[in-house]
């Protein structure tokens, strides 16, 4: 909800400012209509419903995977696409993945969003409205900024949204920001982010390879990024997650696993190997290669898990969010097979929540 618009609508009707808090409490609790807000008079509810839309976003499509994952495609008021995902896990966790920007200014070569035109930063309300939409479906308890965009390049709005997530049931400890390694943002998160978890999309253990697949590495090379992450871990006494997307024949050799293990201090980092969702230019590593890579890291004392992929049948997995055009109909229940990594039983469901 556009909270500025709400304030001015309340002002215009000489309503006290605390009405805004009452309305927020309803929204954060999952209300999906003004009618539910029974501590407001009927007249007020009616006039507000004309003056203030319930959300800044318009849900244009929703797809539900066999595994329970729900992906929602929205448009902003100015027609920019935004996507968010609700992931349901067997242990009861309900995790949401939200976007911080429409499109992305960075051009990681393997990422579908990177191939889209950058739109703009999302406002705090647009970030929160993704979460509120998913909150209306059911209770939620974890949030990751792993949708479209680079959250560290929109950190004011991302941090402001994070402050309100506890009202929706998501504690700050259960909120994670994932970054390409935008160093000024990492340093600011260290100072101002409280308990927010940091995840780094590393994807390569040396500068030559990383610069090839992630051009941002030319601006902030690995040593500088790791320095900033070390500082975060030292200040918060909390491990940093390393995301490593497994690209066949590119970054998945045993030699690179050894190099990665040597780069990472096992007390500070935990590796999450991500099976690649092919979006064009690369193939994903096969299961044995991923397991071998993981075994090498673990053998060298660096904890590594393989991410449980969710919503593959509806293109809801990381980096596929821009592939939303493939959705059709208002709610599509997919009938394709289970995600391969889940079926293999080789995954760690706990890793997705970025919990300790
Ligand atoms: N810009 C931030 C957050 C968004 S991307 C970041 O890069 O961390 C969230 C994660 O999905 C990143 O680790 C990204 O590298 C990964 N990703 C991108 N495309 C992917 C794909 N096709 N398959 C699997 N993971 C992908």
Image (cartoon, grey):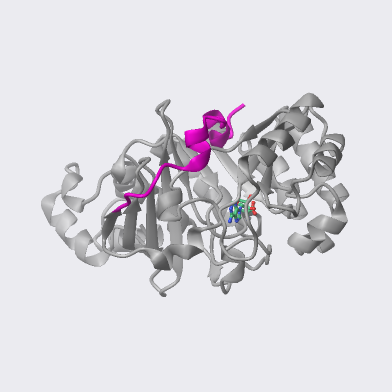
Q: Residue at x 79, y 56 (%)?
A: 210
- Residue 20, given in percent of the width and then of the height, sits at 33, 50
Left/right placement of residue 126 relative to residue 267 reads left
Instruction: Indicate the quadrant where residue 347 lies.
Output: top right
Q: Position of residue 77 (x, y in %)?
A: 38, 71
Q: Compared with residue 227, is residue 331 higher up or lower down, i.e. above or below?
A: below
- Residue drawn 50% across and 41% down? 340
Camera-nearest residue between 149 and 91: 91
Residue 316 horizontal side relative to residue 268, left or right = left
User: Looking at this view, is 326 or 195 the one in front?
Assistant: 326
Residue 309 visible somewhere in the drawing: no
Tell me which corner region of the image, top left, top right, bottom left or bottom right, holds residue 228. Answer: top right
For the residue pair 57 and 15, the one nearer the viewer reads as 57
> Taking 218 as reference, is 183 above or below it?
above
Seen in the picture, residue 53 relative to 28 is either above or below; the reply is below
Which image quarter: residue 15? bottom left
Say if the magenta span includes residue 342. yes
Q: Quadrant of the N terminus?
A: bottom left
Q: Residue at x 42, y 42 (%)?
A: 338
Quadrant of the rendering where the C terminus is positioned:
top right
Q: Residue 98: in sight, yes or no?
A: yes
Q: Residue furthest left?
A: 42
Rendering coords of residue 321 (x, y %)? 49, 59
**Where in the figure is residue 45, as x and y percent of width and height?**
18, 54
Q: How many marks?
A: 0
Q: Describe residue 303's horizontal placement relative to residue 16 as left or right.
A: right
In magenta segment, residue 215: no
Q: Which residues are magenta?
A: 333-356
């Amino acid at each position: 909800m556009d909270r500025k618009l709400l304030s001015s609508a309340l002002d215009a009707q000489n309503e006290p400012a605390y009405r805004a808090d009452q309305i927020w409490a309803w929204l954060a609790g999952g209300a999906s209509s003004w009618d539910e807000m029974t501590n407001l008079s009927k007249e007020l509810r009616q006039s507000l419903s004309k003056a203030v839309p319930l959300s800044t976003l318009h849900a244009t499509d929703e797809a539900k995977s066999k595994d329970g994952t729900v992906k929602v495609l929205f448009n902003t008021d100015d027609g920019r696409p935004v996507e968010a995902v609700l992931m349901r896990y067997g242990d009861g966790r309900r995790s949401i993945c939200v976007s911080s920007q429409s499109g992305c200014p960075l051009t990681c070569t393997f990422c579908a969003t990177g191939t889209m035109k950058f739109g703009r930063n999302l406002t705090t309300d647009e970030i929160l409205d993704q979460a509120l939409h998913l909150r209306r479906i059911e209770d939620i308890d974890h949030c990751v900024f792993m949708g479209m965009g680079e959250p560290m390049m929109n950190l004011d709005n991302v941090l402001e949204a994070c402050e309100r997530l506890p009202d929706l049931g998501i504690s700050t400890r259960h909120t994670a920001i994932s970054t390409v390694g935008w160093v000024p943002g990492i340093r600011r998160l260290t100072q101002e982010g409280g308990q927010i978890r940091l995840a780094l999309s590393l994807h390569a253990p040396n500068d030559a390879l990383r610069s090839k697949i992630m051009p941002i590495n030319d601006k902030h090379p690995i040593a500088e990024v790791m320095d900033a992450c070390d500082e975060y871990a030292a200040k918060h006494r909390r491990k940093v997650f390393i995301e490593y997307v497994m690209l066949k024949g590119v970054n998945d050799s045993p030699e690179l696993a050894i190099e990665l293990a040597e780069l990472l201090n096992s007390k500070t980092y935990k590796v999450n190997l991500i099976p690649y969702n092919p979006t064009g230019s690369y193939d994903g590593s096969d299961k044995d290669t991923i397991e071998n890579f993981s075994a090498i890291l673990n053998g060298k004392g660096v904890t590594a898990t393989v991410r449980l992929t969710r919503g593959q049948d509806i293109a809801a997995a990381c980096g596929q969010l821009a592939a939303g055009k493939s959705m059709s109909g208002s709610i599509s229940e997919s009938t394709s097979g289970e995600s391969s990594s889940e079926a293999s039983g080789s995954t760690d469901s706990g890793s997705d929540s970025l919990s300790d």
